[in-house]
Image (tube, coloured by chain):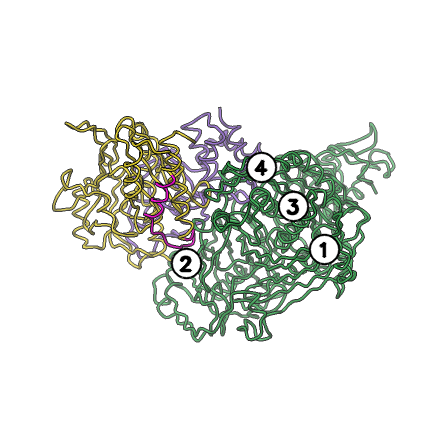
Chain colours: A green, B purple, C yellow
Amino acid sequence: MHDRDDREMGAVGSRLVRVDADAKVTGRALYVDDLTFPGMLEAALVLPGCAHARLLKVDASDALAMAGVHAVVTADDVPGENQVGVVDRDQPLLPSERIRYSGDAVAVVVAETRAIAREAAAAVRAETEEIPAVFDAVRAMEPGAPKVHDDGNVFLEYRVRKGNIDEGFEAADIIVERTFRTHHQEHSYLEPLGAIAVPEEHGGVTIYGTMQCPYYVQKAVATVLGLPLAHVRVIQTVTGGGFGGKEDSPSEICACAAVAAWKLRRPVKLIYTREDDFYRSSKRHPMTVTYKLGATRDGTFTAAQIRVVADAGAYSTLTPVVVFRAAAHATGPYEIPNVHTDAYGVYTNRQTTGAFRGFGQPQTIFANESIVDEVAEALGLDPIDVRLKNGLAVGKRTATNQLLTESVGLPETLRQAREASGWDAKRAERGADSDPIKRGIGVGSIYYGVSLGAKGLALDGSGAHMNVYRDGSVRIAIGGTEMGQGLLTVLTQIASDALGAPTESIHVDHVDTSVVPDSGPSVASRTTLMTGNAIIDAAEKLRATMGEVASELLGVPTGEITFRDGRVGAGDRSIAFAELAAECWARNVNTAADGWYAAPLSTFDEDGQGDAYAIYSYATHVAEVEVDTRTGHVRLVRVTAAHDVGKILNPTTLEGQVEGGVLQCAGMALYERMITDGGDILTPDFSTYILPTAMDVPEIETLFIEEPYSRGPFGAKGIGETPAMPGAVAIANAIYHATGLRFLELPITAEAVRLALADGRGR
Amino acid sequence: MTAAAGDRGNGTAMEIRLTVNDAERVADVAPTTTLVELLRDHLALTGTKVGCGHGECGACTVILDGRPVSACLVFAAQCRGRKVLTIEGLSASGEADRVQRAFVKAGAVQCGYCTPGMIVSAYALLSSNPRPSRREIEEAISGNLCRCTGYVKIVDAIDGASE
Amino acid sequence: MDRPASACAPRWESPATLAEAAEILRDAAGSARAIAGGTDLAVRIRRAEERPDVLVDLGRIENSDGVELRPEAGAIGRMEIGALATHATLAEHPLVREHANVLAEACRTVGAPQVRSRGTIGGNLANASPAADGVVALLALDAAVWVQSASSCAGDAGAVPIVDFLTGPGESVLRDDELIGGIVFDRPSPAARSVYVKAGQRNALAIAIASVAAIFEPDAGIVRIALGSVAPTPVRAGDAEALFESDWRGGADPETLFDAVAAAAAAASSPIDDVRATARYRRILTEALTRSALDRICLRKA
């Protein structure tokens, strides 16, 4: 009834201070491990640690004999179905016959205290018989490889077929082909996974936990307990980071706590040690990506042939969706007339892999953006010029042949990053040969389909419940999760402008699944878009009902009423929002409303053709490095990060998202590698798994381009993932520019650089 | 919570007295109880977080006799008669400390899990060095891992809180 | 994986003197562990790698964390450091910074501020890690270790040179009933310049992949070079030192000489592959770090 676009923006776009900052800086914010319930017990898991084995027996007698131990819960105690798979039904919560990776837990030990539980867990003996295991996805595809699941290791295949690949390469003047590898990356959210399950007197259970996807948890707990969804209530506690790592894994830990609480009829808390978290939480997929790109002499891409092999680990968890995204985006953000992509999800006896900011794309981006640089160099062209020449723009078509009709900021990210970084001068600069420090500058560009796209249609709606009290204060329940990104803050801003109520009067809660309908997962950069639109929907309904009351009170036609800056009315005839709320209450007018937003339909046919995602976000990062050729040490000097975000909702939270993403890219490029030996993780802690510290941070400049999306809240698109995507390859390209070393594997450690130089590679 | 998560039920309890946030406190702990367990489980001061348990992340940073320490690496028994300052102690008067206010203002908080330890490290720095350089700030918080922010706004906040 | 401590909680002892502490250790016959800062022991107990029956808190012992410079007859002066001096203390202490900068620099690179606040130089020695930054510096300083046992206060005369004290990774000559009382070394000449250079996997919070502690005494024309993380214990690069001594005075071209000395230092290493680095890279680093250290202390080049 009211067109929001003609209203002057108020809260949206401002640097509203985070609504949860006070609680967090004072230590008052309550994370799951800060909560306690009467009669609560503590739990610990039993991990036999085998990579692949038959489970013969779980002997808990020693553990049960220990003082303070209440129960050792195994598969036999699961009242419902012993199944926790997110997409495929391939993952037992507590395996009873077969262990498929070293993170598999065979029992939950419950005791008076955490220390007793952990000690007793160490005393549980699992009798196992090792069977041959496979630790490499490419090997796992070969005939005769040990089978992780009986149906074979290749459980997933997507293809994209556009144009004619043979003709495309025929038309090329140059073809470059290489194979790239990436490894596990650990999310390393600072708050480990944790859950509390509380049996309720009505026969159901309430779950508290750190998570991104409460509705996944609700489904998993209902499945293992054999309960209707209505009897499982999930409350998200303040969540200490997610980055994708709290999409699938919380279902497992919450279900473990739930089964234990169910057996004992007492609240049970289960908090992972950091080592448990390394062993059991899903990682970024290791991928092997073969990329072949053809181009004509002027730098026009003619064909791309891509093969992606993703290591899913022992269970598929989110691999079906991750590999879909990787396949759909594998060309990079370019219009290429002929595309031939095959992408596979493969089981191995390694840690499960799932969502991590970028969701399967950073691995393929490492390949495509390295190759684009090689093609540019071979043709004597500037890498940014080549990207601008082939880059997506309005009117161009993606690899899935989707015609882009709006909000394509890629060219502008390239232009602004080039300008702000001083690219042209630095690219031309060549230091003295005698200087042991070599300087380089490199670029990476990406596009990212916002929300779930064609393979997540059933999940792609989100809700909100908005309640205006008679004093004008507003409380909003949502289905999307705050995990640190600033969701509660930007939703407060959206609600404020949508309702014309001051931000101070609005409170947005963490998710409680009993209040808002299943809103899908908080992933894929979809939450601000989806939940923001749901809030706008609810606000529109409230403006309609409350507007009628205002119309009567003020004698102004409803069509002229606006809600702005805490006042409702038209021209000089207005009342305070709070006053109107009181009047509605006095007249028994409902001032609560539900909002809902469903994503537009997407398509992806058997040949990978269709409108795969409704809208895309774009970004370009330029990285500058100094490489010490004596030690191999790479100093990341500066990163210029240009992002097309549709519309800036809050510059502060946006900058924070991007700065954090830039450092995650640096980690992926230079430091982070989970080293394994069979089933053993040799880097299961923060002294061996190397995260960047405050002393490893480059100068970071953030640039925002606003190409509004017509269906986004105030024009906004998703921003959650894109900051963590282009930076790693930009660094790799900068190292190449500095040294002439083209790395085909991440991370590029100081050792990798130095040994490559020692081997005579590079310039 | 009735029993400490980190204590063993059958351990030898020992009584310790110490000063926490300017208040005298007494607790019965086991010899292997760590300071962070004492704070969180015995004294209900849950603002101090546990991120790794091995002194590698800094989430449990508190100030012990004027110096920042990882509370997961200190045994409670080592703190007898000593002074501990936690995140709760910075705003004990009900008013946030200037470091806390600076973190809010600069947008240095995201998920918040590293925040208490980070603020305590910053407070320790500013107590001994009221006008640190950015390099000194980075060094002072180099033992506090943050996965959300890229540290940029955290360093800005501490810089802003310095004199 | 993380595992809790033993089923029986240990006894906690807080002796007031070193001698008393040594007696407790003796009486416990190998089942006691002394705690200095506790930064390593707390982790090992949590992981159940150690299950001591007695924990001996050294933190109540008076006058055990001091730093003193004692002018001795006929000598240039001797530094005495209490075993319980923390890394933070040594990194900041004016006497250490003035007379044994290499030790201050090494201690400043240990872990993070939180660990430097608690971790002690005595604990660092007792752990006998080949990567112990402070120990590498002490080795370059030709330091010796006072060992205290229940039966005797070894004192000055009985000080054990660090080269003899360390016997392998995690191994030293220290018996179960002995403690480190302190550390002594002759002050390098006033003209001496020293440096600690370290390569880790990141710029802070890093365990050394390789490190070099080096001291240059211009008046004597000698260098002392100790290497960390490239052998079962920190080691001295004796051949490299000898090469330097023989050629420096002769006016050799520094570039050529330093390259040769650095190569000799690398030859003194006997590294292994581990999760942090390969042996090959450690050798290369040892050479590069030695070269860099020589540039800085002999030529004052950054």
Element carrying mark 2: loop
Q: Do tag 4 and tag 1 residues touch (Cβ < 8 Å)?
A: no
Per the model, the C-alpha gap separating discs 3 and 1 is 19 Å
Of A220 and C261, nearer the camera is: C261
The residue positioned 77% from the left and 59% from the top of the image is A168
Element on which disc 4 rests: strand
Q: Is residue A155 above or below residue C120?
A: below
> What residue would you read off at disc 2?
C1
Q: Seen in the image, is A448 located left or right of residue C21?
A: right
Tell me the tag on residue A638.
Answer: 4
The relative height of residue C175 versus residue C81 in the rendered view (above or below) is below
- Quarter in which the C terminus of chain A is drawn: top right
Instruction: Mark 3 vs mark 1: give the one in front.
Output: 1
Nearest-to-viewer mark from 3 and 2:
3
Give residue A124's position: percent from left, percent from top: 39, 67
Q: Which mark is residue A222?
A: none
Tag nearer the camera, 4 or 2:
4
Residue under label 1, please give it.
A294
Disc 3 designates what residue?
Answer: A444
The answer to which of A391 and A751 lies nearer the viewer is A751
Q: Look at the numbered disc 1 and give the secondary structure of its residue.
A: strand
Question: Looking at the picture, which amino acid does disc 3 mark?
Answer: Gly
Name the amino acid, label 4: Arg
Foreground: disc 4 or disc 1? 1
Q: Nearer the viewer, mark 1 or mark 2?
A: 1
As for residue A212 lying within the magenta part, the answer is: no
Spatial CA span between label 4 and label 1: 32 Å
